[in-house]
Image (cartoon, rainbow, N blue to C red):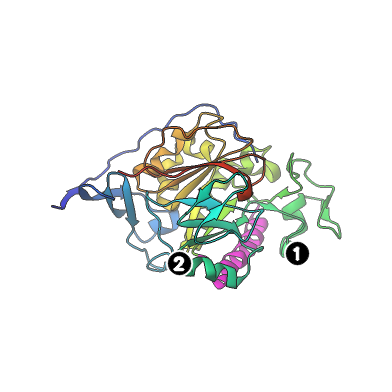
């Protein structure tokens, strides 16, 4: 028989982990629980707190949050601790309803994550017709010179004061920390007022594209510039402000959004805000750097976690908690053909 429990969380829990060094790169008894979730700064203008209700069965949870004014009622996709994932940016389109990698690993995932620009509307529709939740990737914190919308960013917001973008969208002059160390991309300025306006306008257009193409959610990358040389003077506070804006704007489009990496922010005392604002987490190399536990507040809130490991760093599925999904690739790129180990979230 179902039972109900009202749990009001008072105060903040502290989640402490090791030093952050990530690379760039059901069956069972059903329980309904209500937990306190803090609102984003914008939401706080209308409400001081919100309550999230989730139903779970030995770890399987579906989160439902009352919607503040200005937001759509529900995201278009569905996620739970039982959700399974396949993540591919370099091998699209991925086979559906199931997929097999070059090493013979078969994957029947419920959530597909892929590049927003590489896949066309008909392919996204085919995924959804096959019962998949479609999550679209783009970089929310950097400029890729090869992206067609690179012209939407002001030179100073990419290159820094005094810098200019050449005809190939590469910087000449400006902030030496703007260029990413291992990738042909440039960190965006989310610090200065003028660039906040410019960057947010460009990202709003990307969100609109995701909505128009039929994506159920987005996977925004490169959201930790303050920990990578603090280009443009970007700070931890700037990063949090930008992430909360991105979450609110995405939800207003009726889309899901994940937190990509971000262990530094979770450890810095922002776990409650971030878990409230984001629908799931994506983490790279957390087993290698022993920081998977930093993201467990997402699991406690009924929100799944995708773990990605590279270079065959793991050869046997480790013990995972409900909601944790692990994929191991043989190379250093997010190419599903290179998956050598797939460890879906355990169920009750």
Q: Main secondary structure of the magenta part?
A: helix
Whether residue 49 is visible here, answered yes or no, is no
Residue drawn at point x = 24 percent, y = 45 percent: 8
Quarter containing the C terminus:
top left
Q: Is residue 107 left or right of residue 70?
A: right
Which secondary structure lies at badge 2?
loop
Front-most of residues 19 and 164: 19
Could you say where residue 212 lies in the image, as x and y percent from the top left? 56, 73
Q: Is residue 109 left or right of residue 8?
A: right
The magenta-colored residue range is 192-215
Could you say where residue 254 lies in the image, as x and y percent from the top left? 45, 67
Front-most of residues 246 and 238: 246
Q: Does residue 88 show up magenta in the picture?
A: no
Q: Residue furthest top?
A: 18
Camera-side mark, 2 or 1: 2
Could you say where residue 259 lies in the image, as x and y percent from the top left? 51, 48
Q: For residue 270, which quarter of the picture?
A: top left
Tell me if mark 2 has few (under 14), some (14-19) or many (20+) residues whose alpha carbon lies within 10 angstroms of its own. many
Q: Mark 2 or 1 closer to N-term?
A: 1
Front-most of residues 125 and 278: 125
Q: Which residue is mark 2?
A: 254
Q: Residue furthest left?
A: 1
- When the figure is inspected, residue 277 is found, relative to residue 314, above or below; the finding is below
Front-most of residues 83 and 177: 83
- When the figure is inspected, residue 189 is found, relative to residue 46, above or below; the finding is above
Residue drawn at point x = 57 percent, y = 46 percent: 104
Which secondary structure lies at badge 1?
helix
Q: Which mark is residue 151?
A: 1
């Amino acid at each position: 028989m179902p039972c109900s429990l009202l749990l009001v969380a008072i105060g903040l829990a502290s989640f402490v982990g090791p030093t952050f060094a990530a690379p760039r790169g059901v069956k069972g008894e059903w329980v309904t629980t209500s937990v306190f979730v803090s609102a984003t700064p914008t939401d706080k203008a209308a409400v001081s707190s919100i309550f999230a209700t989730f139903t779970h069965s030995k770890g399987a949870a579906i989160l439902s949050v009352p919607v503040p004014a200005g937001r759509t009622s529900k995201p278009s996709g569905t996620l739970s601790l039982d959700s399974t994932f396949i993540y591919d940016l370099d091998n699209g389109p991925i086979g559906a309803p199931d997929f097999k990698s070059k090493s013979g690993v078969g994957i029947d995932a419920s959530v597909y994550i892929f590049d927003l620009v590489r896949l066309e509307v008909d392919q996204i529709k085919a995924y959804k017709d096959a019962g998949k939740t479609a999550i679209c990737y783009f970089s929310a914190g950097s400029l890729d010179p090869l992206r067609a919308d690179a012209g939407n960013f002001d030179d100073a917001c990419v290159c820094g004061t005094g810098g200019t973008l050449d005809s190939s969208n590469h910087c000449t002059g400006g902030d030496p920390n703007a260029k990413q160390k291992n990738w042909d991309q440039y960190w965006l300025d989310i610090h200065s007022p003028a660039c906040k306006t410019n960057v947010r306008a460009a990202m709003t257009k990307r969100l609109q594209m995701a909505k128009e193409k039929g994506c159920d959610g987005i996977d925004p990358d490169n959201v930790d510039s303050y920990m990578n040389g603090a280009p443009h003077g970007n700070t931890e506070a700037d990063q949090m402000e930008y992430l909360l804006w991105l979450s609110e704007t995405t939800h207003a489009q009726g889309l899901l959004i994940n937190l990509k990496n971000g262990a530094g922010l979770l450890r810095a005392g922002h776990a409650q805000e971030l878990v409230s604002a984001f629908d799931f987490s994506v983490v790279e190399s957390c087993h290698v750097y022993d920081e998977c536990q930093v993201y467990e507040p997402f699991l406690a809130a009924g929100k799944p976690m995708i773990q990605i490991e590279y270079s065959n760093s793991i050869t046997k599925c480790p013990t995972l908690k409900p909601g944790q999904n692990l994929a191991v690739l043989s190379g250093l790129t997010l190419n599903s053909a290179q998956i050598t180990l797939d460890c879906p979230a355990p169920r009750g």
